[in-house]
Image (cartoon, rainbow, N blue to C red):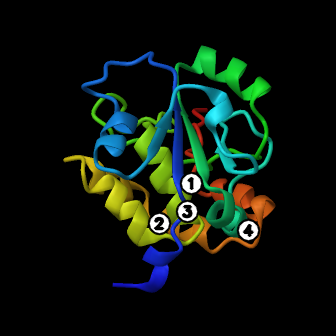
Amino acid sequence: MSQEIFKVPRIFVYHARQCDPKKCTALKLKRHGLAKVVYRLGLLPRGAVVLNPFSEKALSPTDRDRAVSRGIVALDCSWAHGEDVLTTYLRGGSRCLPYLVAANPVNYGLPTKLSTVEALAAALYIIGFKEAAERLLSIFKWGPTFISLNRESLEEYSKAKDSRDVVRIQERFIPRPSVKP
């Protein structure tokens, strides 16, 4: 086992109680002791890396130290509610994830429609905690498929110099519409 286990960032999830608890990936992470779920924004740690799809800055390996010292925060809420939450809760380093494809049963194959666990696993992988990412996903039947679908892009993102480099790299993975004459 690698030494990464001793430095893995703490995982926090703000849960807005807007989903089916039986299908909620965040609540399953909580049941397995892999994430702390909170129901009030004020209980989230200050200065954490906040996974925010509306952020103008992409997550990159340069966010590793902040994640290790302050944690990683994901939001488990509807997109409409998420925008409201993210405009009021920006106490950390707000970062968006680069282009990735979902493996969860609801959004399989759809770009950027990641479940909470997929977003957290992607963040861990990108900042250098691949084993921890695989551990989060291992409690879901479909979880390992997320890494298989995105392995090439996750590897490239994890080698990026900074946020701008991640954005540049993702351009290679975003499908281009075919132009018909």
Instruction: Say what amino acid the circle numbered 3 marks.
Output: Pro
Location of mark 3 (residue):
9
Task: Locate residue 65, reporting x and y percent.
Answer: 70, 69
Rounded to the nearest whole Å, what is the CA distance between mark 1 and mark 4? 21 Å
The quadrant in which residue 128 appears is bottom right
Task: Locate residue 82, reporting x and y percent.
Answer: 63, 23
The first of marks 3 and 4 along the sequence is: 3
Q: Is residue 115 above or below residue 69?
A: above
Rounded to the nearest whole Å, what is the CA distance between mark 3 and mark 4? 14 Å
Location of mark 4 (residue):
62
Residue 137 visible in the picture: yes
Rounded to the nearest whole Å, what is the CA distance between mark 4 and mark 2? 19 Å
Return the residue nearer the eye: 87 or 147: 87
Q: Secondary structure at mark 4?
A: helix
Location of mark 2 (residue):
152
On the rendered image, what quadrant is the C terminus found in?
A: top right
Instruction: Say what amino acid the circle numbered 1 marks.
Output: Phe
Give the mark toward the camera: 1 or 3: 3
On the rendered image, what quadrant is the N terminus found in?
A: bottom left
